[in-house]
Amino acid sequence: MTKAALSVGYSNFEKAINRICYYCILDYFITSGLAIQAKTEYSEIELRSTLKIQGKFNKFLSYMLFQLSLAGFIKYKDSKIIFLESVDGARSISDRIMYLTEEFPEYKEICNLFQHCITHYPQALSGRIPAISVLYPSGNIRFLEPAIEVMEGISNFGWHEIYLKKTLSKISKKRKISVIEVGGGIGRLTWHIVQNLNSENICYYFTDISRFFLAKAIETANKKNIKFMEFIQFDISKEPPLILKDTRHDFVLALNVIHATPSLIDTINNLKSLLVSGGSLLIIEYMPVPLWKNMIWGLAEGWWYFNDGIRELTPLIDKEKWEAILFQCGFKKVRFFPKQTEFLGEIPCIGIIATL
Ligand SMILES: C[S@@+](CC[C@H](N)C(=O)[O-])C[C@H]1O[C@@H](n2cnc3c(N)ncnc32)[C@H](O)[C@@H]1O
């Protein structure tokens, strides 16, 4: 299905799936042992204790409660949360998702992933199973792939990928460059980019916090017979390892990862310390996403790590905040790319070039 075709009807889909989210949250509460009748009152601490929610998901719970309050299912009074009449009469979640899938078959893959995630909340948020194993049940991306493809169809992610590929390829034809990719993960961007680079002129450091992704990337590079790549473990929320700091680099490339750290400013300063004067930090991040997407990615490691006062409810920020933070961190020039997008997408990404 083409992007434009997928995009048609998305806003109705978003309204419908967001509506179901409220019932999913209530269902999660009930399944986890919470008695919910109209006018029952709990403090957030009592809720956490009944749900046996792990500390790292406290922000997720606060986010869910905030959404319920916006939709009129609960209200806050003093330090209590009061469930309202409207909580009664919920139809079963599986029926709701089945009707949603029937109404919006083009988003079937998203509905499947959504249902899979929300039905695992009781085990995953209490730590009985690792939350990340819900998203990666077989330890790889295969399970997520069909839904990610549909999600990318309603985003402008592909435009950013093409822009970066062309830009880096052009530069590597003219001069030697050193590139560090951080949070490379499954290499969604990596393998598109490296295949277009001039191997004579490039040193490409693939990094990630996870040894698992490094091992996978090494395997892929060997298969592709790529010789100009190095693979280094690097947690971007910490000071970079000496092996990266020893030389300065022309580009640091961060796709969909900076948001997953506690402090945007600390992380950006860590990345900035790796750049030559005139070097650029290339960032691709999603703009703040709708409720249903938070309900899926809320299970991802790092989604709720934010603790910097810049983010309040969810980890993603808008263009204006990125610009302000990057200037605050000492970048001289901040540009957004690509300048003209034929297709902005229903769930837009932003591409940022911040130059020292
Ligand atoms: C959402 S995935 C994005 C992966 C890849 N860039 C992409 O878009 O397909 C986030 C990646 O960042 C890594 N990551 C998470 N926190 C990190 C951190 N503090 N430092 C470095 N990598 C991190 C994860 O292991 C994962 O591979």
Image (cartoon, rainbow, N blue to C red):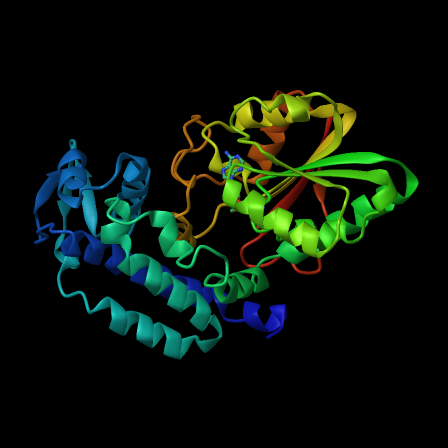
User: Within the image, what quadrant is residue 327 found in?
Assistant: top right
**Residue at x 69% of width, y 41% of height:** 336
Residue 176, percent across and down? Answer: 86, 35
User: Within the image, what quadrant is residue 347 found in?
Assistant: bottom right
> Can the viewer see residue 11?
yes
Q: How many marks?
A: 0
> Can the viewer see residue 340?
no
Q: Considering depth in this image, is 132 or 25 the residue closer to the camera?
A: 132
Q: Quadrant of the C terminus?
A: top right
Residue 93, percent across and down? Answer: 25, 67
Residue 355, percent across and down? Answer: 74, 29
Classify 339 as above or below 278: below
Q: Considering depth in this image, is 262 or 220 the residue closer to the camera?
A: 220
Q: Classify residue 194 as left or right of residue 92.
A: right
Q: Considering depth in this image, is 356 or 233 the residue closer to the camera?
A: 233
**Residue at x 34% of width, y 48% of height:** 131
**Residue at x 23% of width, y 45% of height:** 126
Q: Quadrant of the N terminus?
A: bottom right
Classify 328 as above or below 196: above
* Identity of the residue furthest to the right in this view: 174
Classify 60 as above or below 239: below
Residue 297, percent across and down? Answer: 42, 50
Q: Classify residue 261 as left or right of residue 60.
A: right
